[in-house]
Image: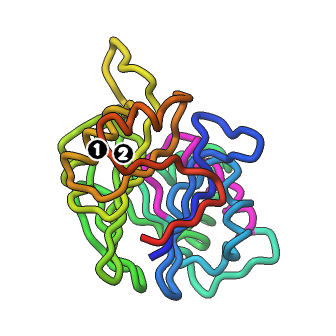
């Protein structure tokens, strides 16, 4: 199984670094995980949009979803053609948000482009050569983490979430744990992101083998995480990792 980093920035894209987006591949199966601002362009360095098997969205914040709008325009009005609507798996209300931006006429057109599935609770499905499992996490709105299994390897992805037991369960025994560390410190009004220390604690509690930090803001995030977990890397756009 191969993971390619398309972007990691939060909450807006920087030069040479789009917002959150990842490409997960096994054999002939490819899934775009989170569609943050700028990630569609990076995705096309690796695969045409029309060759995807599915899109999976962790939650509805714009830095994880904005390029769904450009994907819609590409598939609706440009030269890309799909043999059938592209599976889009996301949180409740995601399509309503798209319609709010695209206009009321798009409500009838979106099903021609995307075959949508709303995530609720813990669930598992198979997409081609990838087995996907997801569960609800803690981000102040409906948000989900992802577990992907293929050929005996396990990739876990936090989406955006504070430290929670659901995330420990999701990442249990993962060969690679892709975990956000968007908080430098915990806010006084309640955490909705992990700190680097939280990510390390999660990786330890889950028994993960490797920790890949993403969506970070603290310049010393890796050093802070290494203090609590030995095998830590920072996700960098363009990076490809074999899981």
**Where is 124 relative to 136, above or below?**
below
Query: In the drawing, what numbered circle is on residue 143?
Result: 2
**Where is 31 relative to 41, above or below?**
below
Residue appearing at x 65%, y 44% in the figure: 101
Res. 105 in view: no
Residue appearing at x 36%, y 30% in the figure: 192
Element at badge 2? Answer: loop
Q: Please identify the quarter of the rendering in which residue 69 is found.
A: bottom right
Residue appearing at x 37%, y 16% in the figure: 187
Q: Nearer the viewer, residue 149 or 88?
A: 149
Q: Nearer the viewer, residue 83 or 153?
A: 153
Residue that numbered label 1 is attached to: 137
Write down the region rendered in magenta: 56-76
Residue appearing at x 23%, y 46% in the figure: 204
Element at badge 1? Answer: loop
Name the main secondary structure of what is drawn in magenta: helix
37 relative position to 119: left or right = right
Res. 65 in view: yes
- Label 2 packing within 10 angstroms: few (<14), some (14-19), many (20+): many
Question: Where residue 50 sits in the image (x, y, percent)?
Answer: 66, 78
Quadrant position of the C terminus in the picture: bottom left
Q: Residue furthest right?
A: 79
79 relative position to 104: left or right = right
Question: Where residue 237 sits in the image (x, y, percent)?
Answer: 64, 53
| CB-based contact (under 8 Å), mark 2 and mark 1 | yes
Question: Where residue 112 sits in the image (x, y, percent)?
Answer: 60, 73
Q: Residue furthest top?
A: 188
Q: Nearer the viewer, residue 216 or 137?
A: 216
Quadrant position of the N terminus in the picture: bottom left
């Amino acid at each position: 199984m191969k993971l390619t980093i398309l972007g990691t920035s939060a909450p807006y894209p920087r030069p040479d670094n789009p917002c959150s987006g990842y490409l997960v591949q096994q054999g002939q199966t490819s899934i775009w995980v989170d569609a943050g601002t700028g990630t569609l362009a990076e995705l096309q360095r690796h695969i045409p949009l029309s060759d995807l098997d599915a899109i999976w969205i962790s939650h509805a914040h714009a830095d994880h979803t904005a390029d769904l709008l450009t994907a819609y325009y590409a598939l609706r009005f440009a030269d890309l053609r799909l043999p059938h609507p592209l599976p889009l798996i996301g949180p409740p209300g995601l399509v309503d948000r798209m319609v709010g931006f695209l206009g009321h006429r798009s409500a009838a057109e979106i099903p021609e482009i995307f075959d949508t599935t709303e995530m609720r609770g813990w669930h598992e499905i198979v997409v081609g050569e990838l087995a996907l499992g997801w569960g609800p996490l803690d981000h102040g709105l409906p948000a989900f983490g992802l577990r992907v299994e293929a050929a005996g390897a396990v990739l876990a992805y936090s989406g955006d979430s504070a430290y929670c037991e659901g995330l420990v369960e999701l990442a249990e025994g993962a060969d690679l744990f892709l975990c956000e560390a968007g908080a430098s410190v915990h806010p006084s009004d309640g955490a909705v992101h992990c700190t680097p220390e939280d990510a390390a604690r999660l990786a330890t509690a889950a028994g993960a083998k490797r920790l890949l930090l993403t969506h970070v803001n603290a310049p010393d995030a890796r050093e802070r995480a290494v203090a609590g977990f030995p095998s830590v890397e920072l996700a960098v756009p363009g990076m490809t990792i074999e899981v």
